[in-house]
Image: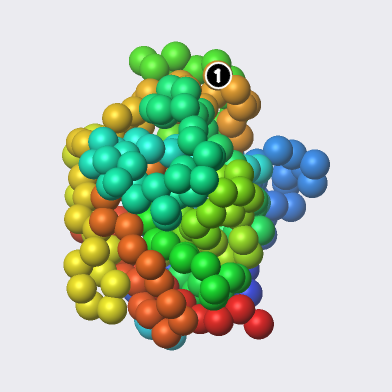
Amino acid sequence: MKLCRFNEDRLGVVVDGAIRDITDVQTEIRANARYDMKGDAVIASLPEWRSRMEEAAESAEPIDVASVDLLPPIARPCKTMAAPVNYEAHVAEMAAQPHVTGEDKGAQRPSGIQNQGIFLKANSAVVGPSEGVAIRFPDRRNDHEVEFVIIVGKEGSRIKREDAMDYVAGYTLGLDMTVRGIEDRSFRKSCDGYAPVGPWMVTADEIPDPGNVPFTVHLNGNLQQDAHTKDLIFDVPRLIEFASEFYTIYPGDYLFTGSPPGVSEVHPGDVMRCNCELIGEMEVVVREAE
């Protein structure tokens, strides 16, 4: 099943390329959820409510995807986690550009994801495809990094690798937008709008092997990043195990799995088109910040 949020906080199921509005189901789920719960009520309720969602979608009129504004697929993530340096080719790519990373100015980091850990992006950085990316610092280099993104399905802490997949609700695509410089990674990657996600969430059953997923990003029509999750250093189960050693994870949390090689600079007016045959395609436009 593909779940999307669109327009003014409406919930839909994507069927045969069209949206079926099931907002009434979302309203009922939220009405029965505690306001102070940690995580997203819809994602937490997905196992129990999925058949009801599918039934509601069957009777709803189709809506053209092109006619709506796509929002982030999760309304209330508790946090947005991200894996650094999780593709060997990207590690080599950035090591060859110390003037870009700031490491030529004495800001060297310990090597390897095991030593660098999972970092956080502010939830205010998360936007849907329709909002686009506003370049906060046009006088500095701003890069795109397309990533395969895990959506957590239930609460857990110190999860074992062999149990990790039980905690996955689904997957989406994300852009880990980055201002290059010497500041802390989380600081530079948490500008408003610097974590576009979408176009929607695909439930875990539709991607039975997250270690076998190709995905791409085209910049202004040119293929820029051509990636495959088989090349991850820490695969999906290991990432969940690793992140949950430090954080309790909650329904609706995002976990960006890391950028493949091919990152490049973007400018206002550029168009990024992210695609994965198993998920879908999202177009994100770059603009100047207000």
Pointer 1: residues within 10 angstroms few (<14), some, or many (20+)?
some
Percent from the top left, x then y, of residue 287?
Answer: 51, 81
| Residue 160 vertical position relative to residue 20 in the rendered view, above or below | above
Q: Tell me which residue sits at (41%, 28%) in the image.
A: 111
Q: Is residue 157 left or right of residue 94?
A: right
Can you name the residue that lies furthest to the front here? 105
| Residue 68 vertical position relative to residue 245 in the rendered view, above or below | below
Q: Tell me which residue sits at (20%, 55%) in the image.
A: 226
Q: Is residue 254 left or right of residue 285?
A: right
| Residue 8 vertical position relative to residue 23 in the rendered view, above or below | below
Q: Is residue 226 visible?
A: yes
Helix, strand or loop under label 1: helix
Residue closer to the observer: 191 or 20: 191
Q: Tell me which residue sits at (29%, 72%) in the image.
A: 219
Q: Is residue 237 left or right of residue 50?
A: left
Q: Which amino acid is tagged 1?
A: Glu
| Residue 138 vertical position relative to residue 263 in the rendered view, above or below | below
Quadrant into which the C terminus falls: bottom right
Residue closer to the observer: 276 or 251: 276
Q: Tell me which residue sits at (43%, 77%) in the image.
A: 267
Percent from the top left, x then y, of residue 231?
Answer: 22, 36
Q: Is residue 73 visible?
A: no
Display coloring: rainbow
- Which quadrant would residue 62 be assigned to in this image? bottom left
- Which quadrant would residue 143 be assigned to in this image? bottom left
Q: Is residue 163 left or right of residue 134?
A: left
Residue closer to the observer: 254 or 35: 254
Q: Which residue is mark 1?
A: 245
Percent from the top left, x then y, of residue 43?
Answer: 55, 45
